[in-house]
Image: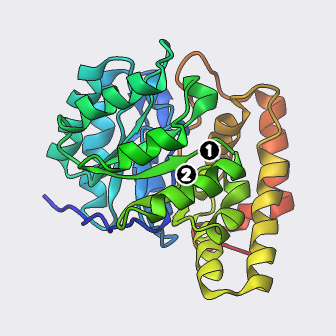
Amino acid sequence: MSKATLPHPLRGIVPPMVTPLKDRDTLDLAGLERLVEHILAGGVHGLFILGTTGEGPSLSYRLRCELIERVCGQVGGRVPVLVGVTDTAFVESVNLAGIAADEGAAAVVLAAPYYFPAGQPELLEYLEHIVVEMPLPVFLYNMPSHTKLKFELDTLRQALALPNIVGLKDSSGDLDYFRQAAGVVRTYPGAALLMGPERLLAESLALGGHGGVCGGANLLPRLFVDVYEAAGQGDRERLARLQRRVEELGDSLYTIGRHSSAFVKGVKCALACLGICEDALAEPFQRFRQREREQVQRVLRELGLERTLATASV
């Protein structure tokens, strides 16, 4: 079994891969293979499966396990694979982490357990208990819009002192929080801080972030790698041009739907229009209807994406 070594800290672009589905509980296997190769061809630094963009919490445990096995097997150690293991049940998170380890994943990603909102002391105690059960390094996932709970800075500080916790993915969209979290992470050599919302990628790198977990990299992985590299090279002119491209993608594609599901629907529909994978979603969501699909096709034409694949950036 081939397994990529997890860098300390993990740096670069780690796309949160969508989960290609044929229906609510069946993987689009051919589409999955094409999507993995499409993303890796963009020069990304890792791959994150079963996150929010991957609809992880909406998928059956059987399908999650199948996805882990197939993705880890196909990636074959070319980049580190990170696996989302967030669950309301402690033991299910641990079980999924065990499967991820067996299949060759490099790390797991864990958000605060949702439904019952824990207090910060309870959240820290939960982390103290679960981290010793995890067979892989753990990235914390700050996603308060979905979990109703954030990793407050003091909790983050204490959590990073625990063995096996190696960083934070912040999807709060709060740059002030990110700035302060960067100060916390700097005191722990080897820990990584990754930005979720792609619109904030360039700013986050300037604040000390180590990279991004950008959903748009499902479509244009090279664009986001170029943003990361331009920031590292201090090429402000190129960085500004690339970041505008990122914003154009978001302003045109992610705003087509009327609900908060619009982002995942838009990305999946665009991938389907490009012939990469099918665009079925897990319940309770459904794919875009014809009217929205035509809008997605128009956006792809306007952005020139009908002619581009992984190598496109500008």
Seen at 82% across and 39% down, the residue is 255
Looking at the image, which is closer to me, 49 or 268? Answer: 49
Q: Amino acid at mark 1?
A: Ala
Seen at 62% across and 68% down, the residue is 205
Residue 159 shown left or right of residue 186 in the figure: left
Is residue 174 in view? yes
Q: In which quadrant is the N terminus drawn?
A: bottom left
Q: Which mark is residue 272?
A: 1
Q: Dot 1, crowdedness within 10 Å: few (<14), some or many (≥20)?
A: some
Is residue 19 in view? no
Helix, strand or loop status at disc 1: helix
Given the current orientation, which residue lies at the most extreme top position? 116
Q: Position of residue 22 (x, y in %)?
A: 48, 30
Determine the CA span between mark 2 and mark 1. 6 Å
Helix, strand or loop status at disc 2: loop
Q: In which quadrant is the C terminus drawn?
A: bottom right
Looking at the image, which is closer to me, 213 or 210? Answer: 210
- Rendered position, 130 above or below 176: above
Residue picked out by circle 2: 276
Residue 233 shown left or right of residue 238 in the figure: left
> CB under 8 Å between callouts 2 and 1?
yes
Residue 269 shown left or right of residue 106 in the figure: right
